[in-house]
Structure formats: structure tokens, C-alpha cells
Image: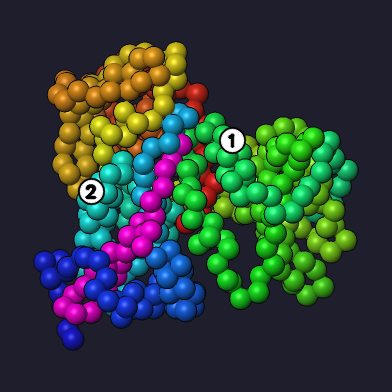
Amino acid sequence: MTHEQTPGDIEVSGPRDDADREAFARLDAESFAVRAADSLRWLNAAGPRITVRLARIGDEVVGGYVLLPCGQFFGGHSVPAQAVSAVVVHPAFRRRGVAGALMRDCVRTAREQGSMLAPLHAATVRLYRRWGWGVCAQTLRQTVRTPGLRGLVGEGEPRRNPDPVAVEALRSAHLRRWDGPMDRPSWWLQVEWNIDDGGELRFEYGWYERDVLTGFVRYEAERQGRWVLLRVQELIFTTPDSLRGLLGFLGANESQSLEMIFLHSALTDVSPLLHVLPEPDRQLELSAHASWMQRIVDIDGALRARGWPAHAAGEVELEVTDPVTGVERFVLEVDGGVGRTLPGGAAQVQCGIDVLSSWYSSALRAEDAATLGVLEGDAAAIKTMDGLIAGGVAWMPDFF
């Protein structure tokens, strides 16, 4: 087959049969250096809950992506979203319009399914920014020397394998305090965590104070030579005792573990470890990789669905340019914790959908965006825009 194709030759649709899903699993494996069998097992475990979209040229599958239905917490409300995952293009077909065709289809498909947002973790920021995604934060990895947790104690006790329903209720109440965390469907961990992984040791513990669940930790262990590396995927704490108790519980592994890693922004960027470790400058190391990017796919729906500060009141007239849907003018009105939009307006503020998405996520102030040259407009209107959303803190503790 010749690869001299044009974007008009690219068809994007769902899998036709099992052979298509297997072809997509092979593409995913080649792109992300994983085993095709593992990718296919994940696809089969997720089953009909997810949306798989494939790009074809002729009869050949040359790319694809997956949408995971979920919610995202913004202003304390869960906003309908489709998390974008496993975006792949065959190496031989890159720079031929396949990725653009997939991204245009992604925006349309997410919106058609009733979602207002489409978050993702970007392997390449340039591509997604071109198609309307805005950067919110990098995925943060925090490595702590295990002995540094020695001496941290809390009133209460750890118990293995707490009730999943109770954990999800605790998690939901906890994560509503930030802008961005996933409101996961009940099947999420069955696919992402409990799926058979070929032998990694995985553990879940709840922290109980007088029989009340106040904290939760989820981690995996891997032997590396004579030492054990602990990788913490999730840490929820709602009281001082649950924070110190769970950290002290993890620190009890110091005889076997030199260090542990809090993966994928499991802890907020302003880490609680900075405040509880005796010498965080010596015991804590931070690194970052893939960026969390956010995309509004339904402006009116997203602005109405999120929560707004109860004290915020005002209106801003915006003009937003979207590379997929074009230019939209509207008036954003916020009052009493409720947002609404009206069509039209005088375009006091102009920006791209990527910048609006970052602002929406509390990751980029409008005034800072203006300083960066990616937003422009009337200074008073820009200040009002920031006042409508003031106080939110962006955080994405889920990796997908």
C-alpha cells in the first residue's frame, strides 16, 4: 500500500470486529512500549463501558483513541466528561493528518455523548494545544525517603481492604474541594487497578478513627534487588490523624524499603509532605512528566454545570475561538453560585478554547493569560473574569 494519502482518505469510526480491536491493541503497544496482550486485556475488561474510535485508510487501522465516561469536580460539582486515553497513530502514517482527524472526531463524539469536558494526559502538548486543549499542570511524582516517615503517628488504626463503597464516598467528598479530580464511575478501579497484572503486589488500607473511615491508601510493591519499592497510587486523608497515621504506616516498611514514590499527582503540588517531614529538603524529591490538559467541548454546558463561588457575581462578554467548531460569542453571568450563558455580546475578552479551558480549571488566571499574550481584552473585564472563579485550586490525581 502506498502511504501517499490525504486527510480526505481518512475514515474515523468504531471497531468493526474483534480484528479491529486487536489491531488497535497492537498500535497501542507499539506507541507506548507495552505488551499488545495487556492492551487487549484492558480493552476487553473495559468492554462496552468505553468508546473506541479508529482511524482507517482503506481497510488498514492506522490510529485510534479511547473515551472513558466519567465526571470531573469543578467548584464542588461533578461535570460530565469523557477522559481521552490511548491516542495512537501508526508511525508510518504520522504527519499525514491522522491525528487531526482523530482530534476533530474526539471533540464531536464527546459532545454527542452528552459530555462537556475532555481531559487527557499529553505525550505531546503541541498536538493537543493545536486542537484546543489547554495545559493545566504536569503530572507530579514525589519520591520520599522511607525512614523520613518514621515517627509519624495518628490516633486510629489501618485496616486492609476497606469497603469499596465507603472508600468511594470518602474519596468523592474529599476531592470536591479541588478543581479537576475525576468523579470515577464504579467500574473504574476494576479496569485500572484490579485487573490481573501478572504478579505485582497491590494493597489497599483504610484508616479508621473510632470505626469511622477517615483515610485511604492504595499502593503496589515491587522487589528491586534486595530492596522493595513502594508506589503509592492514591492517598486520601480527611483528618490530621489519618494523614500522619497512613504516612507512618507506610514508613513502617523502612527495613525493606529505602524509598517510596507517590505517583501521578497522588499528592497535591503543594505537598503535605513539605509540612510533616522533619527535613523535606533532604527527604523529598519532586519530578514531573506528562501534562494534564483540559478541553471544553460544550461551552454552555460546562459553564452551567460547574459550581461557582457563592460570593462571586458579575458578567463578562467573551469571544472564544475553537479550531473544531469555530468562533463563539457569549455573555457569562455568575451570581449566587450559579453560572449561565447568553448568546452574543461585545467580545470584551477574546481567547482560544484552550485558554478558556485552563482558566475554567483554575490553572491559569485570565490576567496571567493576558500577560502571556494568549488572551486579550478590556482590563476591567479580565479582572472581573478572574473574580468569578477566584479561590479554586487545580489538581488531577488520576492518571488514565
Q: Amino acid at mark 1?
A: His
Label drawn at residue 174: 1
Residue that label 2 marks: 112
Question: Mark 2 or mark 1, which has the lower sequence index?
Answer: 2
Q: Position of residue 378 (x, y in %)?
A: 27, 19
Left or right: where 335 falls relative to 145? left
Answer with the quarter of the image where residue 360 lies.
top left
Question: For the magenta stretch, what is the residue range?
Answer: 48-73
Given contact means CB atoms under 8 Å apart, are the residues at marks 2 and 1 in contact? Answer: no
Frontmost residue, 169 versus 308: 169
Q: Hey, which residue is sitting farthest left in the picture?
A: 8
The magenta stretch spans residue 61: yes
Residue at the location (25% across, 32% down)? 300
Vertical arrangement, residue 273 with respect to residue 348, above or below: below
Is residue 50 in the magenta section?
Answer: yes
* Image spot of residue 73 (x, y percent): 46, 37
Residue 277 percent coordinates (x, y)? 79, 41
